[in-house]
Image: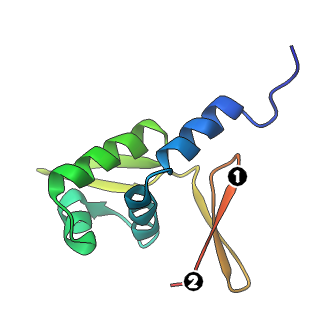
Amino acid sequence: MAEDRLQSQMCAEKLKALGEPMRVRIVDLLRDGEKTVTDIAEHLDQEIVNISHHLKVLFHAGLVEKSKQGRFVYYTLHPDVSAVSRGKIQQLDFGCCRLELPSK
């Protein structure tokens, strides 16, 4: 069997998770740092239950991490998802591919 240099299964799972526009918006928002579900829902003007669902998908795809602090759960980008700036272009590096983002 040929070597899978792209780690295609893992890459496909990440891309599938990003295939929903709201999840891309959540990932973009988390570039600014950790946020609670409530913070994200308020910022994106969405229901908490919908944001929770999207965060669960992103978590299972390895794109976000969560940590509990008291009664709050905070979400951040997974450390393997690095934000890279190249001049005026910002990118999120998922390991298997990069997503170019507009500057904030």
In the rendered image, residue 76, in percent from the top left (x then y), is placed at 39, 57
On screen, residue 73 versus residue 84, left or right, reads left
Residue at the (41%, 56%) spot, across then down? 23
Residue 16 place in picture, x, y as percent: 53, 42
Residue tagged 2:
103
Q: Position of residue 53 (x, y in %)?
A: 27, 45
Outermost residue on the right side: it is 2
Mark 1 Cα within 10 Å, few/some/many (few <14, many 20+)? few
Q: Which residue is drawn at the image coordinates 46% and 68% (left, top)?
A: 28
* x and y percentages locating residue 17 in the rendered image: 48, 45
> 31 or 69: which is nearer to us?
31
Label 1 belongs to which residue? Answer: 97
Q: CA distance from mark 1 to mark 2?
A: 19 Å
- As displayed, is residue 79 above or below residue 61? below
Does 2 sit above or below residue 6?
above
Neighbours of disc 2 within 10 Å: few (<14), some (14-19), many (20+): few
85 or 53, which is in the foreground? 53
